[in-house]
Image: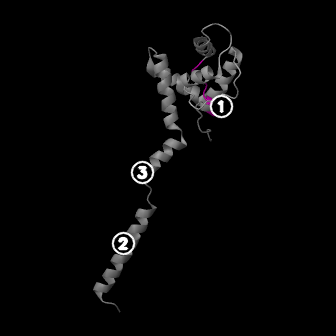
């Protein structure tokens, strides 16, 4: 047989291989955390909640957040995007800021600037035609829907 020292050295090599395999199979906690945040769209959710909170500045921020989380959950249950915080009146006001002469039409450059004001940075005008209020609202709704918060489907 082998001598005790040889056996012990062989045992150590085996232990080191086991330890190496164990270390390799362990997941990186930072990577796991990143995956979790991404899988559940937590960053998007926090951004949505903080934006809504700072925009509304409610008297009771905790209750506001509870209500907002309920809305998010209902949309998530129905597999729908969370509606934009911009209402029709906001889009009308935005349009009015660019239609300073009251002509009822604004340029596509103005539409692009209005989209940037709404947080849409990658809007590209499809044509050079002037845009009326109804068309502007349709464009804004479509673009806002593209950037709307979407939460992963709820699986039972």
Q: Which residue is mark 1?
A: 80
Mark number displayed over residue 16:
2
Q: Relative to 110, is 120 above or below?
A: below
Q: Predominant secondary structure in magenta?
A: loop
In which quadrant of the rendered image does the C terminus lie? top right
Residue 62: x %, y % from top left: 45, 22
Query: Residue at the spot x=60%, y=20% of the render?
Result: 110
Q: Is residue 84 left or right of residue 28?
A: right
Can residue 69 be seen in this snapshot?
Answer: yes
Query: In the figure, 153 relative to 144: above or below?
Result: below
Q: Residues within 10 Å of mark 1 (few under 14, many from 20)?
A: some
Neighbour tally class for label 3: few under 14, some 14-19, many 20 plus, Cα within 10 Å: few
Check whether the beta carbons of the residues at disc 2 and disc 1 lie within 8 A of each other. no
Q: What percent of the width, then of the height, locates residue 136?
A: 67, 19
Q: CA distance from mark 3 to mark 2?
A: 22 Å
Which residue lies at the image location 43% right of the left edge and 59% below the top edge? 26
Closer to the camera, 57 or 111? 111
Q: Earlier in the sequence, mark 3 or mark 1?
A: 3
User: Closer to the camera, 63 or 106?
Assistant: 106
Spatial CA span between label 2 and label 1: 52 Å
Q: Quadrant of residue 39?
A: top right
Mark 3 sits on what residue? 29
* Span of residues in magenta: 75-86
Q: Is residue 150 above or below residue 116?
A: below
């Amino acid at each position: 047989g082998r001598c005790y020292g040889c056996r012990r050295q062989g045992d150590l090599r085996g232990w080191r291989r086991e330890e190496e395999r164990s270390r390799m199979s362990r997941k990186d906690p930072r990577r796991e955390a990143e995956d979790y945040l991404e899988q559940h769209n937590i960053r998007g959710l926090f951004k949505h909640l903080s934006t809504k909170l700072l925009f509304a500045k409610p008297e009771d921020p905790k209750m506001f957040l509870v209500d907002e989380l309920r809305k998010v959950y209902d949309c998530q249950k129905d597999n729908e995007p969370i509606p934009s915080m911009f209402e029709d009146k906001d889009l009308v006001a935005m349009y009015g800021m660019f239609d300073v002469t009251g002509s009822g039409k604004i340029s596509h450059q103005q539409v692009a600037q209005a989209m940037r004001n709404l947080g849409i940075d990658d809007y590209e005008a499809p044509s050079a035609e002037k845009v009326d209020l109804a068309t502007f609202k349709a464009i804004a709704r479509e673009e806002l829907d593209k950037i709307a918060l979407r939460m992963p489907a709820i699986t039972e």
